Image (tube, rainbow, N blue to C red):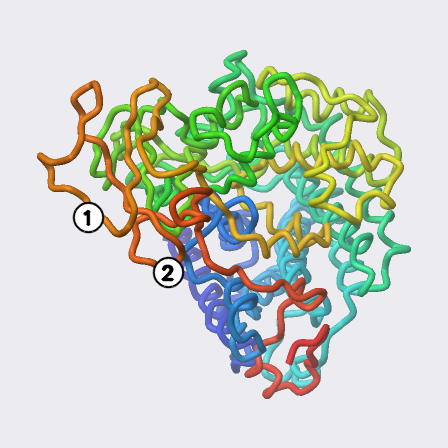
């Protein structure tokens, strides 16, 4: 009964936090209910801290690249509103939510009174400060300068409630003070799915790399001289995890399966690569798995991402003559094995059919207007047992990211060596049987063109281009691409409309790799024949018909040139206005309430 009462108290506390999510300045009670009776034991602290874990991404992370150059989406995203609509503080209103911070600060204020040892107090203070650092990094990512609060605000705190923004410098310094305390005091081991010291240090490394490179490539902040301090933190934290965390890349030697298995597992416990994961169990805590990851719901992967994968011999895909007009089957020949563990490939057998009317068996790419024609299998559970998909564990932090963080930090500082590459990028490549990356690699003009500001950034700029490629490929469709483009000052890449499969003209095409045609493209001026009138292939199977045309026409698939070219997913992605769109406005309703909250970088 005592534990049940404590859980009920937790819900009361949580309710206060949620109540102020929609309006930061909503009135709060002068006194808290039950704080004197709750924060007493380690069990109390643990129960309350569990409230903070919703910050970690779930299954939706596999759809999070949809508004980047990695994938297209038919969803109504914030970036679409900004780049193609009317973008101002009245239309961009999400994100200004402070309830979670108040819950964290309430927790931190009450730890000292707990009847526990100093070690326990320090551990839970570290947990609280870690989650506060996470909260503020997410706010800085959106707004740059934000008000800093390290107390749980009440109605009497009018001066604090109506304060203006604090500088990015000040807030980030506070964030890394929190991270440092957590890194020194959170326990090194934990129960499965809980935060431990290695989780803290991995996020600290990720966010230090973000802040350091953001300052380096964004002159509008005028903070370039402080960039290396944070890149150094990223390097050191990553090295600590590498040297002392006991992690390793997951590998059984199955180069065509090991990578994909990380994202379709019902048990990641004990996996040497997993630093943190979300645990799910059918009918206890379901994973939230849905077939949206497979495609033709909202998100579909892009040709640009596909062309970033290397050939199996390590050469650039773009080194091939006519690479831009390769047919679907050819695109997957002799490629980095991660491509066919991320994209549905020619010959892929679909078992978990869901709403796909063609049914199970060898999958024929389903084409549809506004989708690329490529389908994602990373994160897709390809079996029909719902208890399996409901029990899907979600990797939140992988050791591969730590290796890439270290390599990028060393390259940004011009300190990279072959030994560094061998213990980071090349370990990742060897898992899938790819050749090593060596110092002074040849420059891929396409990759260089993606990042025109990189040549003067570091003496290791050539290596840095390939480290960025490796990060894009290894972490593809895991929700990191947007923040990477933002910190590299590469927002202009978002203006390019994502494209899909290439077709040289009308006619019949093989999409399964067996040499037998599966689909037929006809002009949109023609009607699709009735069932018996459809042509059959040499296997006696009816061809799948698609009416093709240009954007805006009555067609089932849009091609660049109307009857030929790449599949077009969207007519216009709009303009990425620099530096404005690297930031978000404070919602106008909040500025009306508190005029001290001024807008920055051209927002109104």
Asked which secondary structure carries label 2, the reply is loop
Q: Can you see residue 219?
A: yes
* Structural crowding at the residue carrying mark 2, measured as other residues with C-alpha within 10 Å and reported as few (<14), some (14–19) or many (≥20): few
Q: Which residue is at 66% across, 85% downward?
A: 158
Residue 309 lies left or right of residue 137; in this view the side is left
Q: Earlier in the sequence, mark 2 or mark 1?
A: 1
The residue pinned by badge 2 equals 552
Dot 1: few (<14), some (14–19), or many (≥20) neighbours within 10 Å?
Answer: few
Along the line of sight, which residue is nearer the eye, 349 or 591? 349
User: Is 229 placed left or right of 105 in the picture?
Assistant: right
Location of residue 20 with respect to 513 vertically, above or below: below
Indicate whether 531 appears above or below 451. above
At 70% across and 30% down in the image, what residue appears?
Answer: 403
Above or below 477: residue 600:
below
The residue under label 1 is 527
Residue at (28% x, 42% y) in the render: 522
């Amino acid at each position: 009964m005592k534990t049940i009462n404590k859980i009920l108290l937790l819900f009361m506390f949580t309710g206060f936090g949620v109540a102020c999510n929609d309006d930061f300045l909503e009135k709060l009670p002068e006194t808290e209910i039950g704080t004197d009776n709750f924060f007493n034991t380690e069990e109390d602290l643990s129960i309350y801290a569990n409230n903070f874990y919703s910050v970690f991404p779930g299954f939706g992370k596999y759809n999070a690249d949809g508004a980047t150059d990695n994938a297209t989406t038919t969803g109504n995203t914030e970036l679409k509103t900004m780049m193609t609509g009317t973008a101002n503080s009245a239309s961009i209103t999400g994100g200004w939510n402070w309830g979670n911070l108040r819950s964290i600060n309430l927790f931190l204020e009450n730890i000292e009174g707990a009847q526990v040892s100093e070690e326990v107090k320090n551990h839970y203070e570290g947990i609280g400060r870690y989650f506060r650092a996470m909260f503020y990094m997410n706010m800085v990512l959106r707004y740059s300068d934000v008000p800093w609060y390290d107390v749980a605000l009440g109605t009497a705190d009018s001066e604090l409630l109506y304060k203006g923004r604090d500088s990015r410098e000040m807030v980030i310094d506070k964030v890394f003070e929190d991270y440092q305390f957590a890194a020194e005091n959170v326990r090194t081991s934990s129960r499965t799915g809980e935060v431990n010291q290695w989780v803290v240090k991995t996020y600290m490394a990720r966010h230090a790399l973000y802040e350091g490179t953001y300052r380096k490539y964004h002159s509008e902040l005028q903070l370039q001289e402080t960039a290396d301090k944070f890149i150094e933190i990223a390097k050191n934290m990553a090295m600590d995890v590498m040297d002392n965390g006991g992690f390793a890349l997951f590998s059984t030697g199955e180069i065509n399966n090991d990578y994909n298995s990380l994202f379709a597992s019902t048990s990641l416990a004990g996996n040497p690569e997993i630093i943190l994961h979300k645990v799910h169990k059918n009918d206890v805590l379901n994973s939230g798995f849905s077939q949206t990851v497979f495609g033709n719901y909202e998100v579909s992967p892009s040709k640009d991402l596909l062309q970033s994968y290397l050939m199996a011999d390590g050469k650039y895909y773009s080194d091939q003559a006519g690479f831009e007009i390769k047919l679907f089957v050819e695109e997957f020949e002799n490629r980095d094995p991660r491509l066919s563990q991320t994209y549905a490939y020619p010959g892929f057998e679909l078992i978990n059919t869901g709403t796909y009317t063609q049914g199970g068996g060898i999958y024929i790419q389903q084409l549809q207007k506004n989708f690329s024609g490529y389908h994602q299998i990373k994160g897709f559970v390809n079996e029909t047992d719902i208890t399996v998909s409901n029990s899907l564990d979600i990797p939140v932090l992988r050791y591969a990211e730590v290796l890439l963080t270290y390599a990028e930090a060393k390259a940004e500082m011009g300190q990279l060596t072959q030994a560094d590459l061998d213990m980071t990028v090349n370990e990742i490549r060897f898992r899938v049987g790819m050749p090593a990356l060596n110092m002074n690699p040849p420059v891929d003009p396409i990759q260089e063109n993606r990042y025109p500001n990189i040549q003067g950034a570091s003496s290791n700029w050539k290596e840095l281009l390939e480290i960025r490629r490796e990060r894009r490929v290894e972490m593809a469709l895991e929700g990191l691409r947007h923040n990477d483009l933002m910190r590299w000052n590469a927002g202009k890449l978002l203006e390019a409309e994502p494209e899909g499969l290439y077709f040289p003209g009308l006619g019949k095409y093989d999409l399964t790799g067996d040499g037998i045609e599966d689909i037929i493209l006809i002009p949109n001026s023609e009607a699709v024949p009735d069932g018996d009138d459809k042509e059959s292939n040499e296997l006696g199977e009816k061809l799948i018909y698609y009416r093709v045309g240009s954007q805006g026409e009555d067609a089932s698939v849009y091609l660049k040139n109307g009857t030929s070219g790449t599949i077009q997913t969207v007519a216009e992605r709009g303009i990425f206005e620099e530096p404005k769109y690297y930031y978000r406005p404070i919602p106008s309703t909040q500025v009306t309430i508190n005029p001290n909250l001024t807008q920055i970088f051209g927002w109104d």
